[in-house]
């Protein structure tokens, strides 16, 4: 498998976190253009949601993990944080409870990820924000302020219409890439969440993460 | 030996109680220092009930004592704590020290409660019941001359009055809680009154294989019950989860209980060495679970060790023997999510029965199938959906054919394990508590700026899956020195709550079912007056209610008429809300912004009859409570702030005196 030429330079690991029903999987679904694992959910050894994007002229493979369905298992997401280069923290703008819970998610993320992990806050379901705003439960300004105070990037997005979904994933990647360029993110650190894939020596560098043909 | 118990009418909300935990601990240590017997253990259970259990005699006997505020109970003829260390006390949640209601009950009452306490798991509770059926030898506790009720600060009259008041309130609240929970269906009725008999004194004394086998028996009994319909419904996190997917929920709950238990037991170790010992012990349990192919509990144990409170304990991890560490790494590797849980799926596929799989991956698969092939109501299920779901159901039902009957049942271990309950609704609070305890045990490095405490710990611990490895990396990795952009913020984001409007709905802590019955309004003087302590439970919407807030330092000059032995300044974010001062503890060592303080209040002090006066220096003012003989000294950040506080306090006090009759009771006090 490792024989094939790599058509990307880096792999970034992303995780998507947030309460149940905020639309995490829909975001993933939307972003990976529905090419994710729904078709072979229990196939062994395939990557979960992936897509190759272009960041500053470099091909970057995003490897996106999502634990939808397991939120009730208290600890599952905790082991899942490690080695994430980007964390998309999602809440539902029509349900304040999901917003209120962000602080817990943030604490966990910061305790269990690298300091260099880029956290992107996404207010999902902005399509439900009708003209009179009747369904909206969290204002943009409020969330924006929260994001600013905590140094998070923030957009409101809609997994349904696709609004801002690309942007969230791409901006996160840009920020991560920037960190690499600045030397803030150490590629050799075990859990940086980023793998560099020089075309020649790919396979022994990260034997587990060969791209799959699925 | 008598079998008796004093029981409190618990007030409805554990979160209130949680904040009084320190008071319990203080009372506990008093209790301990005054007792002499051997072979008895005192612990505080998750309902804030102290349990004194005696295993030094052939028949197991037990007694429960509730500590309510400063009231505590000693029974010199029975108590003992000779072999009890503070660190051994469970740090569960809780205590209600606000309601001074005491009720004395006998074993009949106990039986009634045990029926109510937990019915979700279909096991007979033979052991527990048999201990309850012990004859009641003693007369009711209050008449026993050996028992002293020590009351610190009020007269008996006051207490009996309160007793009546709050009994009513608490019963009401309990009923409410019951109704509420039968709606959300995740908490058994009377769950605040959970009791448990605990014949197992110390986890370490039980061989790890016994825990592994008994956990497997418990897990499998629930796992076996899961029906295909529950799985295809994908409703285990919806509001109707208990009707539609009761066994999936129960199975998940088992996972979480094991995980909480693991964290809790490890945090009981007072020293890094002791904690490492406990950690190693749980790793060995993990190994046994692995041998039994119980991936469910194995993952619960493993992920507990990877949870924030344990994972960050780098000193503890450094004390862990290398071979235990390697064992842990190997076990943890199984649960790596790489390539869609490649390792776990491979393991499971290669296994022979019996096996209890980790259900989570199947649930994720199902959710994704559900998303890719949604089931439209009214129509037939699409063929693809059916096909794919059936594939998963087949796998699961194959595992359900497992047979664990070869495992011997150990009733004492079983009943101990069953006694570990965490109320789902309060999961977040338990998590918070565990995290705080972890911070206390191994404080974040003070060398770095205090405002970055969370960052420091994450630097330390996040380098790798193995915390020890992580800290060694820390020494050589340049990354750890750097604190990038978003880390600069001091806030952990908890301050978002301060902006919550008062209409905020209280949500189920695990999913989003709204707990309708909870009051969501702020404190009103009336609520305070009536002893409605529920304001502690809701997120305080202070923005509307508070007339003054800011960071203050407080020193206790007089407490219950006594000078405290240690006087020190403590920092709080303080809000003046009508008739009470609400104190929020600091998150870190310095900082004067709201965001530097926690969102959960730690104390609420009614100021109805207080007297405020200005201090000797301009940034100081005093608050004197003649009823309770408490005097506090407050220091504001500046002279003008102190003056503002003084005037605001003065104003609210005079308002209060105009509007309210003197309150009937002192319902809340500092611990």
Image: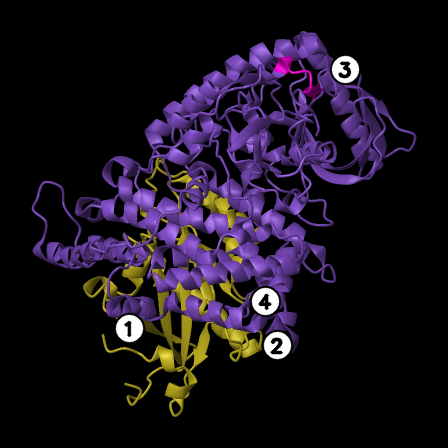
Chain colours: A yellow, B purple
Q: Earlier in the sequence, mark 3 or mark 2?
A: 2
Sooner in the amino-acid sequence: mark 3 or mark 4: 4
Instruction: Tell me whether marks 1 and 2 sit on the same chain.
Output: no
Q: Which mark is residue B627?
A: 3
Q: Is residue B49 magenta?
A: no
- The part of the chain drawn in magenta is B142-150
- On what subunit does the disc labeled 2 rest? B
Q: Tell me the tag on residue A45.
A: 1
Write down the quadrant of residue B398 in the picture: bottom left
- Residue where numbered disc 4 is placed: B320
Residues at circles 1 and 3 in contact by the CB criterion of under 8 Å? no
B634 sits to left or right of B318: right
User: Between A108 and B597, which is closer to the camera in this rendering?
Assistant: A108
Q: Is residue B22 above or below residue B213?
A: above
Residue B670 occupies quadrant: top right
Say whether residue B635 is visible: yes
Determine the secondary structure under disc 3: loop
């Amino acid at each position: 498998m490792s024989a094939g030429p790599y058509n990307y330079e880096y792999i970034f690991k992303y995780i998507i976190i947030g309460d149940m029903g905020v639309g995490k999987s829909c975001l993933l679904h939307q972003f990976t253009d529905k090419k994710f694992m729904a078709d072979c959910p229990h196939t062994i050894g395939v990557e979960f949601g992936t897509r190759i994007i272009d960041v500053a002229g470099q091909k970057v493979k995003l490897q996106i993990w999502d634990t939808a369905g397991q939120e009730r298992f208290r600890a599952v997401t905790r082991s899942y944080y490690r080695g994430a280069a980007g964390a998309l923290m999602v809440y539902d703008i029509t349900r304040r409870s999901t917003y209120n819970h962000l602080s817990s998610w943030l604490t966990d993320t910061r305790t269990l990820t690298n300091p260099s992990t880029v956290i992107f806050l996404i207010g999902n379901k902005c399509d439900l924000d009708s003209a009179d705003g009747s369904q909206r439960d969290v204002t943009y300004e409020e969330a924006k302020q929260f994001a600013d105070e905590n140094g998070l990037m923030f957009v409101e997005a809609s997994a349904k219409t696709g609004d801002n979904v690309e942007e969230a994933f791409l901006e996160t990647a840009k920020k991560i890439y920037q960190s690499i360029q600045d030397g803030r993110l150490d590629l050799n650190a075990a859990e940086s969440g980023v793998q560099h894939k020089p075309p020649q020596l790919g396979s022994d560098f990260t034997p587990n993460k060969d791209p799959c043909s699925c | 030996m008598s079998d008796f118990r004093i029981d409190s009418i618990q007030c409805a909300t554990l979160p209130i109680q949680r904040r009084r935990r320190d008071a319990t601990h203080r009372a506990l240590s008093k209790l301990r220092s005054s007792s002499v017997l051997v072979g008895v253990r005192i612990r505080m259970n998750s309902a804030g009930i102290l349990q004194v259990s005696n295993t030094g005699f052939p028949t197991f006997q037990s007694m429960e004592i509730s500590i309510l505020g400063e009231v505590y109970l000693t029974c010199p003829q029975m108590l003992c704590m000779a072999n009890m260390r503070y660190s051994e006390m469970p740090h569960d949640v809780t205590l209600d020290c606000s309601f001074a209601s005491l009720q004395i009950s006998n074993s009949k009452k106990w039986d009634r409660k045990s029926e109510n306490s937990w019915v979700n798991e279909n096991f007979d509770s033979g052991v527990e019941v048999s201990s309850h059926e012990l004859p009641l030898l003693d007369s009711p506790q209050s008449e026993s001359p050996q028992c002293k009720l020590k009351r610190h600060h009020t007269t008996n009259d006051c207490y009996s009055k309160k007793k009546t008041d709050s009994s009513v309130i608490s019963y009401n609240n309990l009923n409410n809680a019951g109704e509420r929970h039968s709606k959300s269906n995740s908490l058994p009725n009377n769950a605040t009154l959970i009791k448990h008999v605990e014949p197992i004194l110390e986890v370490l004394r039980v061989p790890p294989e016994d825990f592994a086998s008994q956990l497997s028996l418990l897990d499998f009994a629930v796992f076996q019950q899961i029906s295909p319909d529950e799985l295809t419904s994908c409703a285990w996190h919806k509001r109707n989860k208990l009707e539609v997917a009761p066994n999936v929920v129960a199975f998940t709950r088992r996972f979480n209980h094991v995980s909480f238990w693991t964290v809790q037991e490890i945090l009981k170790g007072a020293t890094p060495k002791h904690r490492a010992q406990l950690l190693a012990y749980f790793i060995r349990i993990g190994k046994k679970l692995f041998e039994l192919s119980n991936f469910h509990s194995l993952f619960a144990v493993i992920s507990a060790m990877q949870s924030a409170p344990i994972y960050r304990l780098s000193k503890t991890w450094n004390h862990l023997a290398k071979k235990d560490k390697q064992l842990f790494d190997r076990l943890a590797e199984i649960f790596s999510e790489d390539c869609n849980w490649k390792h776990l799926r491979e393991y499971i596929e290669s296994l022979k029965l019996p096996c209890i799989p980790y259900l989570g991956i199947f649930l994720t698969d199902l959710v994704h199938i559900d998303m890719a092939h949604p089931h439209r109501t009214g129509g037939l299920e699409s063929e693809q959906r059916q096909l794919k779901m059936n594939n998963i159901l087949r796998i699961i039902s194959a595992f359900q054919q497992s047979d664990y009957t070869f495992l011997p049942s150990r009733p004492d271990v079983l009943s101990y394990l069953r006694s570990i309950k965490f109320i789902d609704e309060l999961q977040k609070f338990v998590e918070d508590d565990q995290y705080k305890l972890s911070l206390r045990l191994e404080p974040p490095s003070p060398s770095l700026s205090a405002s970055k405490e969370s960052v420091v710990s994450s630097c330390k611990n996040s380098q790798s899956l193995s915390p020890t490895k992580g800290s060694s990396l820390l020494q050589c990795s340049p990354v750890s020195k750097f604190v990038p952009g978003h880390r600069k913020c001091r806030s952990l984001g908890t301050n978002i709550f301060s902006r919550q409007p008062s209409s905020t709905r209280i949500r189920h802590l695990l999913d989003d079912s709204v707990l309708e019955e909870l009051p969501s309004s702020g404190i009103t003087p009336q609520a305070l007056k009536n002893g409605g302590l529920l304001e502690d439970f809701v997120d305080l919407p202070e923005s509307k209610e508070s007339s003054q807030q800011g960071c203050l330092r407080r020193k206790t000059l007089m407490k219950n008429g006594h000078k405290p032995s240690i006087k020190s300044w403590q920092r709080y974010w303080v809000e003046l809300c009508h008739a009470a001062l609400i104190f929020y503890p600091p998150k870190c060592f310095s900082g004067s912004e709201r965001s530097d303080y926690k969102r959960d209040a730690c104390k609420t002090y009614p100021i109805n009859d207080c007297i405020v006066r200005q201090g000797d220096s301009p940034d100081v003012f005093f608050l004197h409570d003649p009823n309770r003989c408490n005097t506090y000294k407050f220091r504001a950040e500046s002279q003008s702030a102190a003056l503002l506080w003084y005037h605001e306090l003065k104003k609210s006090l005079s308002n209060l005196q105009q509007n309210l009759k003197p309150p009937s009771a002192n319902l809340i006090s500092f611990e």
